[in-house]
Amino acid sequence: MTHKRTKIVQADIGTDKNYKAVSPPLYLSSTYRFEGFEKEGQYDYGRSGNPNRDALGKAIAELEGGAGGVVTASGMAAIDLVTNLLSSDELIVAPHDCYGGTHRLLTHRQNQGRFRTLFIDQADPKALASALEQKPSLILIETPSNPLMRLVDIAEICKAAKNIGALVAVDNTFLSPARQLPLSLGADFAIHSTTKYLNGHSDVVGGCIVAKTPEHFEQLGWWANCTGVTGAPFDAFMTLRGMRTLHARMDIAESNALALAKFLKKHKAVDHVYYPGLRSDAGYKLMKKQQSGPGAMLSFDIKGGREAAKTVLESVSLFQLAESLGGVESLICHPATMTHRAMDADARAIAGIKETLIRISVGLEDKTDLISDLKDAFAKI
Ligand SMILES: Cc1ncc(COP(=O)(O)O)c(C=O)c1O
């Protein structure tokens, strides 16, 4: 059987019938000629369908092991898309420490009366059991969580969800299908901000939701066309191009991340390291159970308060002080004032996101250069 690594390198390669181009052509046309009166071809209009978008959705679905993938204009559009399956009296249970934009979306959609949202600590069995008693229609999981890298047991939550007839969607952005396969653990949907590891080069904003069943794939496709959140052809073309190297990128970035985590753990300026690849990490055992590797995201609390964090962030030269993650280049950020500023201070405190927390997206540079950049920045505190 062909490995997924092989399949993604080869996705849509050599399919061009016109000129035998090895790399798939880009189809920018917004509209398609009918073959005749009432004789529609495979595509009619770019919002409803496009060859590049379809190739990307198929490739991501293949990696995730789902029936199909709906490609959206952003990760947020993919998360919003799945909520169309709910009506106003239905409940979504989400992690209290999810990505700030997801927290904002679910909070404001609730305020609008679109559905009800309950944020809980999904790692707390009591909180989860009491949330399930309220019969949610959808459980949204984000593991590892952003930015504290906390893990929750996908298979356990899916089992409990199935007992009450709830659907489960897993935001798999932080690991990508190269390291975690939520559908194989019982989830109904795997969601991606393809902006991150799937595209991998920090030059496209996009999203995708993979459905396990053909029925859900069709429903999501219908809503994507209806609401017009489908992704652009050029973005899909770029993302598929980036995805061909997903496994190779992840292997290098992950090995760098482990080296950085070990360095940080020993450094006297560092209070705590959050990286499930460390044996001492609270998530290590679960990481071994449900992931094929720890991935390349990590965070740490620095000693010396907000000022020390500011010094480090302003002193690094190789790391880019920027939001986002999953690109070939290493990024560093301050979640409290950057990625998670959309959450109010109380919600941040509940989630455990302190002013001393620094998050790193580890890239593909030489690990010794990354370590020496951090070492120099710590020396300035
Ligand atoms: C875990 C996670 N999910 C979803 C999103 C949203 O994706 P996008 O920025 O592509 O809309 C992000 C963005 O950082 C994220 O980190």
Image: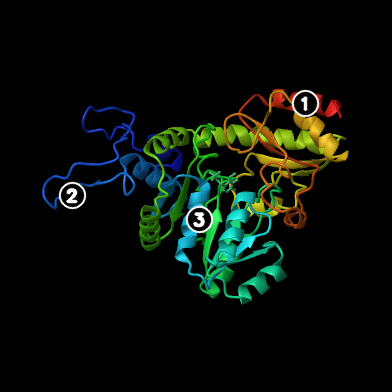
- What is the number of callouts on the image? 3
Residue 40, disc: 2
The residue type indicated by label 1 comes to: Ser
Mark 3 — residue?
A: 80
Observer-nearest residue: 378 or 59?
Answer: 378
Mark 1 — residue?
A: 315
In the rendering, at what x and y percent does residue 288 appear? 64, 51
Labels 3 & 2 near each other (Cβ < 8 A) = no
34 displayed left or right of 93: left
Q: Is disc 2 placed on a helix, strand or loop?
A: loop
Distance of label 1 from label 2 (alpha carbons): 59 Å
The residue type indicated by label 3 comes to: Asp
Q: Is disc 3 placed on a helix, strand or loop?
A: helix
In the rendering, at what x and y percent does residue 358 appear? 75, 39
Check the image and report above or below for 140 versus 380.
below
The residue type indicated by label 2 comes to: Glu
Instruction: Determine crowd level at label 1: few under 14, some 14-19, many 20+ residues with C-alpha closer than 10 A.
Output: some
